[in-house]
Amino acid sequence: MTQGCSIHVGLNRVDPRHYGGWDGELAGCENDARDMKRIARSRGFRTQLLLTRRATSSAVTAAIAEAAETLRSGDILFLTYSGHGGQVPDENGDEFEDRRDETWVLFDRELVDDELYALLGRFEPGVRVAVLSDSCHSGTVTRARRMAELRASAPMARAFGIDGERRVKALPPDVQERTWRRHRALYSRIQRAHPSGERAAIGASVILISGCQDNQESADGDRNGLFTEKVLEVWSAGRFRGGYRRLHREIGTRMPPVQTPNYYRVGTPSPSFERQKPFTI
């Protein structure tokens, strides 16, 4: 029988001991994870919830690795992340454009995208993986300053559809640099352990819908992150009709111009997977 498992990660803060005294406080990420878990459970998935202190690098990687051991061709993993996004300098040569690896900012350290690609490479061909990531991938002072200006100016914020009270889910540039310098040996060791990086062989069919483009930032909120808020609106308690591409398009129509959800595929293309109603076992 076809089976589905889901993993939902949400962090409202991180351990300041790793991030140089910065705790990264957010408001809606745990709710994002709980709401995604509710969707998964309603669709018959076996669910796992990792919130804040439990959302460590070892717990997240172990959960994904266990799914890779369990799932077989035709099965599905539904993986969601809500929290800060960051970047570290690319030291294994797999990032040709900006020379930086994207990260999920977990409680105890950043999870480098090279690690995630390696984990995805463990899944059998024919396994479907749907990933929703409500996080930022902005790594420059210029981009962070631009978003700060938008939030600070009420008329400009209204024009761009940004709530001035919303935090953004980005590791601040000074914290990002300080964290990397302090733990450079750790992140260099992680990258050396995953030399293939984004070129890792992946046989599964992976669809990722992320909260913004790599050069943008995702907004947090009091109840949900902006991206997750729009996912819930479009999903409409299961009344949504269409596949993953339509889900992405309809979310995008509800987002402000400065936050454009991204859609891309990794691994073995599967048009039938893309056409399925999202989160279908």
Image (cartoon, grey):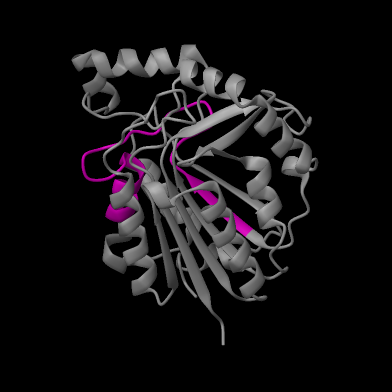
Q: In this view, does 145 lie above or below 84?
A: above
**Residue 102 at x, y percent in the picture:** 59, 34
Magenta span includes 229: yes
- The residue sitting at 45% across, 68% down in the picture is 277
Which image quadrant: the N terminus? Answer: bottom right
Up/down of 163 relative to 111, above or below: above
Corner quadrant of residue 219: top left
Range covered by the magenta-colored residues: 206-234
Q: Is residue 113 left or right of residue 242?
A: right
| Foreground of the two, 44 or 56 | 56
Point out residue 42 in the picture as x, y percentages from the top left corner: 34, 73
130 or 185: which is nearer to us?
185
Q: How many marks?
A: 0
Question: Where is residue 86 drawn, in percent x and y?
Answer: 52, 30
Residue 139 falls left or right of residue 47: right
| Residue nearer the viewer, 16 or 164 | 16
Instruction: Name the residue: 71% across, 51% down.
Output: 118
- Residue 11 position, x and y percent, is 38, 44
- Magenta-drawn stretch contains 181: no
The residue at 61%/27% (across/down) is 183
The answer to whether residue 155 is above or below residue 121 is: above
Q: From where the camera sits, is residue 240 visible?
A: no
- Residue 270 occupies quadrant: bottom right
Left or right placement of residue 255 versus residue 138 in this view: left
Measured along the vertical axis of the image, is residue 92 above or below residue 242? Answer: above
Quadrant of residue 64 in the image? bottom right
